[in-house]
Amino acid sequence: MGSNRAEVLGSFHLAPLEPVLSFWFGRLWPDAIVHFAPYGQLLEQLRGACPSRPDSSADDQRVTLVLLRPEDLLRPDGRLPGEASADIAVARAHLSEIAEALADPPAPVPSIVGLPPASGFVRASPRLRRFDEWAREVIADAIERCPLVHRVPLDDLEFLYGVNEVHDPVRDDYGHIPYTDEYFAAVGT
C-alpha cells in the first residue's frame, strides 16, 4: 500500500499554518503525512521536492504546497529591507530560479502555489511594487508551463473569510511571520 505525503514550502515562517493544515488534512486526507520544509529553503526544496524515496511505490500520492511572497526574496538576512537597500537584481535572479524549478519539477508531483498579498511597505513603494508585480507575472508564467502546477488564488481571502487584519508587521519584522493567525487560518482552509 502506498503512502500519502504533503510537502509544505514557504518563503516565510509557516508555523501558524501547521495546526490549520493538520486539522484539514486530518479530516480530508487522514492518512497523509504533512511535512513542513525548513525555513529559508524554498528553492532547495523545490529542486528536490518530494524526491523519490527508496520505499516509494506506484501507489504513493504526494502533493507540494508552496506559499511564495515575492518580497521575501528581497530580505536574504531575514530582516525587512529599506527601500534603497533592497537588492532587486539579486531577488530577480533568485525568483527566476524558483520559477524554473516550478516549471520543470524534479519529480512528477502535483504542486499548488499560492502568492499571498504584498505588505503595505511594498505596496507603498513604486520600485518594490513593480518588482512584486513582475515576480507574480513570472510565477504565473511558470505555472502555465507545467500541467502539474496549479495556482490557488489568495487575493480575496480576507473578504471570503471575513479576515479583519491580514498583515502582522511586528511578527514579520521580528520573526518573518508576515500574516495574522486569522489570515493563516483562511489560507489553510
Image: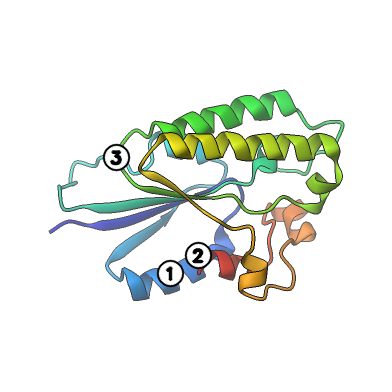
Please tell me which residue lies in front, 150 or 70.
Answer: 150
The N terminus, quarter of image? bottom left
SS of the residue at dot 2? helix
Q: Amino acid at mark 3?
A: Pro
Q: Residues within 10 Å of mark 3 (few under 14, many from 20)?
A: some
Specify whether 188 is left or right of 129. left
Where is residue 54 drawn, in percent x and y? 19, 41
Q: Amino acid at mark 1?
A: Ser
Q: Amino acid at mark 2?
A: Glu
Q: CA distance from mark 2 to mark 1?
A: 6 Å
Q: Residue at x 67, y 76 (%)?
A: 162
Task: Please say whether residue 105 is visible from this viewpoint.
Answer: yes
SS of the residue at dot 1? helix
Mark sitting earlier along the chain (3/1): 1
- Which residue in the protein does label 3 denote? 108
Q: Which mark is residue 62?
A: none
- Which residue in the protein does label 2 denote? 18
Task: Please say whether residue 182 is visible from this viewpoint.
Answer: no
Where is residue 102 drawn, in percent x and y? 45, 36
Q: Residue furthest left?
A: 1
Where is residue 157 drawn, in percent x and y? 62, 66
Please tell me which residue lies in front, 26 or 118.
Answer: 118
Choose top left, top right, bottom left or bottom right for residue 90: top right
Mark sitting earlier along the chain (3/2): 2
Q: Residue at x 61, y 72 (%)?
A: 160
Q: Residue at x 71, y 64 (%)?
A: 166
Q: Residue at x 64, y 57 (%)?
A: 155
> Label 1 near label 2: C-beta < 8 Å?
yes
SS of the residue at dot 3? loop
> Label 2 near label 3: C-beta < 8 Å?
no
- Which residue in the protein does label 1 denote? 22
Q: CA distance from mark 3 to mark 1?
A: 24 Å
